[in-house]
Image (tube, helix red, strand yellow):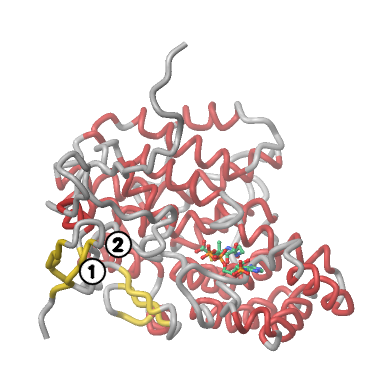
Amino acid sequence: MTDTLTVRDDRTGKEYKIQIQDGAVKAMDLRQIKASEKDFGLMTYDPAFQNTASCKSRITFIDGDAGILRYRGYPIEELAEKKNYLEVAYLVLHGELPTKSEYEDWVHSVTYHTMVHENVKKFMDGFHHDAHPMGMLVGTLGALSTFYPDAKNIFDAESRNLQIYRLIAKIPTLAAFAYRHSRGMPYIHPSNDLGYAANFLSMMYTPSPTTKYEPNETLAKALDVLFILHADHEQNCSANAMRSIGSSHADPFSAAAGAAAALYGPLHGGANEEVIRMLTEIGSVEKIPEVIAQVKDGKRLLMGFGHRVYKNYDPRARIIKKVAEEVFQVTGRNRLLDIALALEKVALSDDYFIKRKLYPNVDFYSGIIYQAMKFPSDMFPVLFAIPRMSGWLAQWQEGLLDPEQKIARPRQLYLGSPERHI
Ligand code: CMC
């Protein structure tokens, strides 16, 4: 078998042999195909990157048809069962699970970068009391770049590592501060004796700086598993934003703010918030047929369903369903789960969904757990952003060090007016 593609241009009758590598042809190899001497050369048109690989990556593997997700080769199910979020974040970033001493150093470095400059509180205070926490997170992540001008040294490995510690350590602090600000409650400083998820719960829920608060172990463990499931997801909208901003050699704080902004949208990280809104609006199992009819008439989307890549059950949704049961043993059952389960059952047996291969995605059940854990729904995308930081940074660093990458700059098909004069 030869690894070439023979293309015949019917405009000119010419034939071209194009190399196939790793199951792809290089779009630049099409440029030689010209209808005339003056022709710019053939381009591909792919508005939402539906069939375009924008990079070579060794981080996350997804087989959407089979419902498989692996980080650095390890199945998500094994990682969720046997590892904690910081071990997984290390794996995603470094390519291997940490040894004992690497793990200790990593945890120490992340733990000792969780504090934010006191001035961060001042601009957090500048937001309206009803500002969306995701907006506050986007703003404060970007603002952190002004505190760390050394972050511009993106080709210095030591500096990159330092920014990685800072971003992974500080994002839960910013997230919790955004929540406390919206409640008019005093900010709670990080506790170095708590794990990553437990510390976040402590900064969220400690009633006041003078009160001791013990995060529930089951809930902290459940949140940690949810963090693992959200650590990376290859070239999704926000990872693509991170890589694209990083490709101009902007510092990682600015790039992470851009990635968080991409995650904010209701079609990406905002979907879990929309799911709760939808389930609350549905309100009872009896109303499900009416909602399904609206979806089939194209009047609304079933939020938490469908995925660009998964054409099978999202493996993360399967794990989340199990975690939900553990959480409900502590919090009591969230009645929205019954509506969600019934909705899933109806959708999975309906032709509209079967034909289009629409299955529950990660967001369908995550919001129900977050709600049971007393997170307000506008914090849900923030809960997605916290663990996704490790994936964004891994994608950013991989892109930066890839000799085949350049500044991201797509082409367009110009269909506007030809030259004209006033
Ligand atoms: N409800 C009803 N119909 C849907 C849905 C849905 N949730 N998702 C896709 N479809 C239909 C769509 O209308 C289209 O039908 P037709 O062929 O008749 O025009 C067909 O399925 C294919 O959909 P698409 O819009 O071409 O798919 P896409 O790959 O462009 O969009 C998606 C993927 C996730 C944006 C979309 O499925 C969606 O909007 N889902 C709801 C929002 C959601 O849950 N997002 C979270 C994604 S998972 C977390 C993350 O990674 O961010």
Direction from residue 315 to residue 281 in the image, left or right: right
Looking at the image, residue 42 lies above or below residue 89: above
Direction from residue 421 to residue 327 in the image, left or right: right
Residue at the spot x=15%, y=61% of the render? Answer: 14
Residue 416, labelled with which disc?
none
Q: For residue 98, which quarter of the picture?
A: bottom left
Q: Nearer the viewer, residue 238 or 422?
A: 422
Residue at the spot x=20%, y=57% of the render? Answer: 12
Looking at the image, residue 128 lies above or below residue 297: above
Residue 408: give x, y in percent of width and height.
Answer: 28, 44
The residue at which mark 2 appears reads as 53
How busy is the neighbourhood of tag 1: few (under 14 within 10 Å), some, or many (20 plus)? Answer: few
Q: Label 2, secondary structure: give it.
A: loop
* Residue 172 appears in the figure: yes
Q: Label 1, secondary structure: give it.
A: strand
Reading the chain from its start, which is encountered first: label 1 or label 2? 1
Whether label 1 touches label 2, CB < 8 Å: yes
Looking at the image, residue 391 lies above or below residue 160: below
Direction from residue 187 to residue 81 in the image, left or right: left
Residue at the spot x=76%, y=68% of the render? Answer: 297
Q: Nearer the viewer, residue 373 or 339?
A: 339
* Residue type indicated by callout 2: Ala
Q: For residue 188, which quarter of the picture?
A: top right
Whole-Å distance between the Cαs marked 1 and 2? 8 Å
Q: Quadrant of the N terminus?
A: bottom left
Q: Nearer the viewer, residue 288 or 91?
A: 288
The residue at which mark 1 appears reads as 24
